[in-house]
Amino acid sequence: MQRRQFLWRSTALSVATLQGTHAVAQTTCPPPPPSTGGIDVLKEIKSLRIPTGPYTGGYEIAPNGRLNWYFTQLGLLPIVQFLSTAELDTYIRVYLDLYLKNLTPAATIDDVNFPFGRANTAVFTKVLSDSDDAYAATFLSLAVRYVRASRNWTWWETNKARIKEVAYRNLALTAKRSGLTSVFQAPRSETNSIGYLMDNCEGYRGLRDLARLLRERSEVTEANYYDLLATNAATGIVNQIYNVAGKAFTPSDADLVPGTSFYPGTSCQVYAQVFGINELSRFFDPAWAYLNAKSPGWEDGRYDPYPWAILGYAAAMRGQRTQATAKQASIEKLFTTNRGMVTINELGFYQRTHSVLAGTPAV
């Protein structure tokens, strides 16, 4: 199984296929730094907000596309800092409430297809998510970032029990002896209990974000617990996923050697750095070298119809401005020629890249 199915088979996709630390309260906020000749990310993400029907306040991954909660969260995270108090409520808080409302009793969530797109958002079909752990992790990071920006502690206190349950069921109960999380809860874990590198990097970040907030709220015992889970995940990546001989990460604990395919083999190499797993910092340089050796020229988008903006973000983080800028340009071109391929998560990483290049990284 490939973790992101509609990225894996992206050559056959179109928009139609896509259907199936510590901030003070914000009162006014400057817009995102402008990208010369670029994409207005805030405008585009706002335009993807579903305006009617039972999923009002959710987001399409692209115009008339599926509601994929995981991709949405990756798109929303970078724009929180640019929203006013009123906008935080409209574009983030309403979404978080919708997510919590649609959780299953096991604290998992299904994606949503709209067969008629915006023509009739009341008609929908639910689709199994392609992970439990990554959806939960990115939700945790978004919830924490929202409450830091809004200072809406009433919302936090009202919802924190359910938020903790999301963390516990998807990132604690799914943890294997290695420390890595299984991609699914039971019973889906019976057919796929793999620990994926990408998921575990996202899981690490969500756990650290939650733990830090809990510690600041004097919930020290639980903070220590979730910090320990994050540390265990980092240890699991070192012991089960980083390949010393190959000087690169394998895509999962089910792979014996690093992959040479673009997805997931080389594209996964940046995730540990992007999601801030500092315990793995000694591996950042060899993993980056592996990406560039096995997938040279990735910045022009030659390997996949989707832009993989996360790679440009990694380049920007590493001070590789030429590659980061080239990736931004290729995304802007794709946005013009094939809008559906620049999904909400890609917009998010495009914005993150621009922010780093402009000297205004996320707070």
Image (cartoon, rainbow, N blue to C red):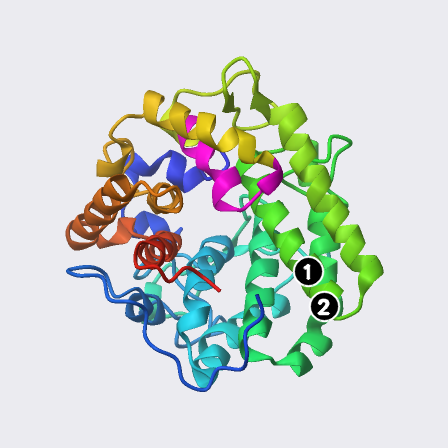
For the question of whether residue 181 can be seen, the reply is: no
Residue 35 coordinates in the image, percent (x, y): 22, 61
Q: Secondary structure at mark 2?
A: helix
The residue located at (48%, 78%) in the rendering is: 88
Name the amino acid type tagged 1.
Answer: Arg
Characterize the local packing of mark 2: few (<14), some (14-19) or many (20 or more) Cα atoms within 10 angstroms: few
Q: Secondary structure at mark 1?
A: helix
Q: Which mark is residue 216?
A: 2
User: Is the C-beta separation of discs 2 and 1 under 8 Å?
Assistant: yes
The residue located at (81%, 62%) in the rendering is: 220
Residue 212 lies in what quarter of the image? bottom right
Q: Which mark is residue 212?
A: 1
Q: Which residue is at the far top?
A: 245
The Cα–Cα distance between marks 2 and 1, rounded to whole angstroms, is: 6 Å
The residue located at (55%, 71%) in the rendering is: 146
Q: Is residue 179 left or right of residue 63?
A: right
The relative height of residue 64 versus residue 299 in the rendered view (above or below) is below
Asked if residue 263 lies in the magenta stretch, the reply is no
Residue extent of the magenta highlight: 265-279
Q: Nearer the viewer, residue 28 or 336?
A: 28
